[in-house]
Image: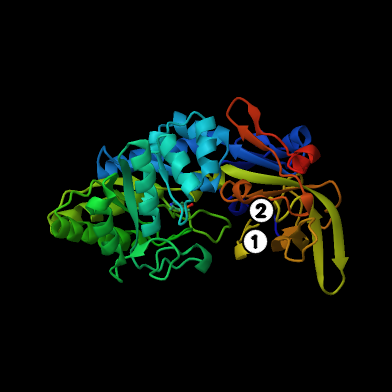
Amino acid sequence: MVEVCNNELICANLTVNDKGHLCLAGWDTVELAKQYGTPLYLYDEGLIRARAALYQKAAREAFGDSARVLYASKAACFKALLEVMKEENMGIDVVSSGEIATALAAGFPLERAYFHSNNKTDEDVRFAIENGIGAFVVDNAEELYAIEREAAKQGITQKVLLRITPGIDPHTYAAVATGKVDSKFGSAIETGQAEEMVRLACSPVLSHIHLAGFHCHVGSQVFEPDVFLQTVEIMLAFVAHIQSTFNLEIEELDLGGGYGVRYTEKDPALSIAENIKTVGKRAKECAKELGIHLPKILLEPGRSMVADAGMTLYTVGTVKRITGYKNYVSVDGGMTDNPRYALYRSPYTLLPADTMKAERGMTASVVGRCCESGDILQENVPLPESISRGNILACLTTGAYNYSMAMNYNRIPRPPVVFLTKTDTRLVVKRESLSDLLRLDI
Ligand SMILES: *Cc1c(COP(=O)(O)O)cnc(C)c1O
């Protein structure tokens, strides 16, 4: 039996009101479910703004005033969110023409955008340069040539960073570990490929390319501070080596994203400010030892900017008790709005939003409505015995990689997004309709 315990309210913006309803940013989630329908994505806008401010302050204090924070758009990308990033003076990183188009629609100044991806098409390159992208984070040689061709055509010199693989195992799920030598991303220092890329970028053949620095991103949902300390050591040593070998000034060093967030009580609560401070201290020590200036440092948080600002609400449809085996609670969403359990077995906290004070006398697999056995949100979720059709369930910490990974399998429309502030709630992305689903069919 699990009594209501505060430990499960894993983020400070969660409370339970007198009716026993779960609240996010002070708003009664049961009321929001009634008003906007389910499934429903909620975001605590105040928390996102506070995070942006916190990150920027911490980065400046740690690395100096030139430091910049780029929000990794892929964590959650829609107009209203990029408008918030614009207003908070953040930079962004983008990985596709679609994310660039969203930034443009939000009026985001594209000179503050960095374009990632391990395979940018010629069309992506053209679109980005045409719209004045700040920088490309170049993954490979073909891309350097493609940028050179397009920059020459448009008569500009294009700033680029090279994506470098520092060769670090971040102790996270294999699917999100990106900094190891055999990664699909970037060029490894260890194999000499990174240096080869520098040589190519600096060659007179690529006269429309300006190599401004390096980028690395070692993984995601990382809690160990050591991973980031090792990264900064390896990358600054590489900067020093390149500067002396090529007589070249490295202006920028982008350390990527990756800080972990709390999905369940078991995850530690990480102090972003403390972590950045420690990395800053190590960066300054390293630069001194190596006898180089600390380049302008960029950080690229995605998950830790938005994950715990988000929540998804569902309505229970069916409860199936297979006596002696297990219980299933089916909700009106599932892998189509949150494919992360299906992809990575990601842990999540699911709570009975409308009966928070009831005893939890049963456990169930909370599953979605797709024709797919893997359509599971979470196993072994403690729930009240009384749970039945119409009850509201909340899945916490869904602000990152949920809406952005949502899909239309089984032709299930994607849920809407609602922003919550101190004073109001507002729809920022509409619920997909059946005619939206059919709009491309000829
Ligand atoms: C995904 C990604 C990020 C953000 O990672 P988080 O773990 O969400 O902070 C930053 N930079 C690059 C290049 C990425 O691919």
Residue in view at x 50 percent, y 62 percent = 176
Tags 1 and 2 in contact by the CB under 8 Å rule?
A: yes
Residue bearing the label numbered 1: 341
Q: Amino acid at mark 2?
A: Asn
Instruction: Please provide percent x and percent y for residue 64.
Output: 24, 41
Give left or right: position of 268 versus 239. Answer: right
Residue bearing the label numbered 2: 338
Instruction: Please provide percent x and percent y for residue 63.
Output: 26, 45
Give left or right: position of 376 versus 326. Answer: left
Q: How is the image coloured?
A: rainbow
Report crowding for label 2: few under 14, some 14 to 19, many 20 or more residues within 10 A (C-alpha). many
Give left or right: position of 314 versus 75. Answer: right
Give left or right: position of 315 versus 312. Answer: right
Q: Foreground: 18 or 267? A: 267
Total marks in image: 2
Q: Is residue 330 above or below residue 49?
A: below
Quadrant (top left/top right/bottom left/bottom right) for the N terminus:
bottom right
Residue in view at x 62 percent, y 51 percent = 405
Query: Which element is circle 2 on?
Result: loop
Q: Foreground: 137 or 440? A: 440
Report crowding for label 1: few under 14, some 14 to 19, many 20 or more residues within 10 A (C-alpha). some
Q: Can residue 91 be seen in the rendering of this structure?
A: no
